[in-house]
Amino acid sequence: MHPRDRLVDGKPLTEQFTVGGAVKISGDVRVRRSESEVYPWNSPIPLIYVEGSASEMGRQFGLATSEVIRKVVKFNVPKLEKILSDSGIGKVDYLRKVEDDVKRFTTSEYLDEISSMAEAASVGYDDLLLTNMNIDILYTLPAPEVHAQLFCSYFAAWGKATVDGSVIAGHNDDGGRYMDQFLVLKVAKPNRGHPFVSPVVPGYIGYHSAVNNTQTYCCSTGISDVMRNSEILESAVPSWFLFRWLGQFSDGVDDAVSRFLSVPNMTCINWCFTGKTGAKIIEATPKHHAFAGFPDSRGDWIVSAGKTLCGELEPYLVKAEHPDMGDYRYDSILRAVKMSLGRIDTGAAMRIMSDHYDSSDNTVRASENTVCRHMEYIGRFAGTCRSLIVRFNPPSKNPPSTEVFVALGNPCNAYWRRVVFDESFNMTSLI
């Protein structure tokens, strides 16, 4: 039996989420019961559609995922409140500062969306807003230098690197598995900005992977080296808000880069932008940034996975002990992409993101060092939680179409859901 065909208590559970009274999602959605399972996922990722104003989308999403939002808030809030308290920061003052920064650098409608989402899910607005600050609080307080690394992996290929010249990019979300077991694929048609699709944890305003109808893909990877305490900015855009703003409003790679550089960010990661003709990676702390180079002179592919790519940023980083997992994982995805150059299509992309080559000892074995990350083998409830592949058809082909493939959980052991969008981001195929 394939892992995705396992049932809950021997019975499938079908969920239907609705928007405006019309059924917008249907399918066999199986859920797990035990929070101690190593592989909690056994189903295609659920799709949820929202549309309209920010408040309307918040209400729709909150109603559709209310039970999960309550779980996510319950899990996050006590931990985040304790970190704030231990850091001598008042919760209310902190959140009012967050609101001010969101309004100043992005758009106040995101606060309206969170408010409507909170009301629909029967949770407190401040609690849900605090939950949206989880990544920034966890990796900046009490001081960035004391925190563990962020992870994830990414590649993009185009031109002669792919079979037909199309742009193909892949991103693995590596992190803790408790909240990410609840990931859904959000398809949004906002009144302002561009239609977009994003795998997101219910309750979050955004997450670190989003594709819009201008064929712009924004995502990120972490690096093993952490930023110095001196890199912290007093005012900056919280991460989930920044990802949402970039994914919703960017008109292309150059516009996404310009937008990113026009506002202050909170954390130290690699920002990966893919578009119709290629990709760029910006390695950035809140105060400094640099553009990553291509791995070779071809200039039609690029990768990122845990390794500092720009030496000029090293004065602003606290170096890990090297070689480490970031170095090994970078070398692993580097090898996987190199072996497929000239033959990369969506099938090859799935194999790359599912790759189990461990460069630390030159073996093929699922581990914490592989592209498809398996941290359960070192006793941690973490690893790859979601994989996303996007394909933008070649510029010579009109009208443009966007293919998105999403695997929930480790991609080597998952159901790949395929969604195809036309130029207006109307869904033309769903598998």
Image (spheres, rainbow, N blue to C red):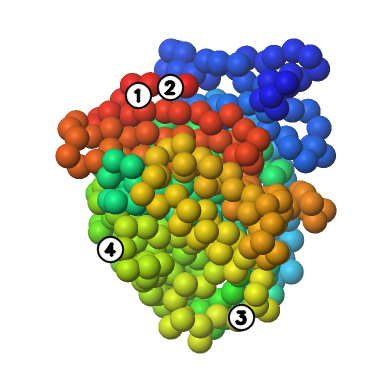
- The quadrant of the picture occupied by the N terminus is top right
User: In the shown orientation, is residue 270 left or right of residue 177?
Assistant: left
How far apart are labels 2 and 1 at the CA level? 7 Å
How far apart are labels 3 and 1 at the CA level? 45 Å
At horizontal 40% and vertical 45% (from top left) the residue drawn is 344
Q: What residue type is labelled 1?
A: Met
Residue that badge 1 annotates: 427
Q: Which of marks 4 and 1 is nearer the N terminus?
A: 4
Specify few, some or many for label 1: CA neighbours under 10 Å numbering under 14, 14-19, or 20 or more: some
Specify few, some or many for label 3: CA neighbours under 10 Å numbering under 14, 14-19, or 20 or more: some
Question: Callout 1: helix, strand or loop?
Answer: strand
Circles 4 and 2: CB distance less than 8 Å?
no
Mark 4 vs mark 2: give the one in front: 2
Circles 2 and 3: CB distance less than 8 Å?
no
User: In the shown orientation, is residue 181 left or right of residue 100?
Assistant: right
Residue that badge 2 annotates: 430
Q: What residue type is labelled 2?
A: Leu
Question: Callout 2: helix, strand or loop?
Answer: strand
Q: Where is residue 163 in the image (x, y as percent from the top left)?
A: 33, 42
Circles 2 and 1: CB distance less than 8 Å?
yes
Q: Which mark is residue 258?
A: 4
Q: What residue type is labelled 4?
A: Ser
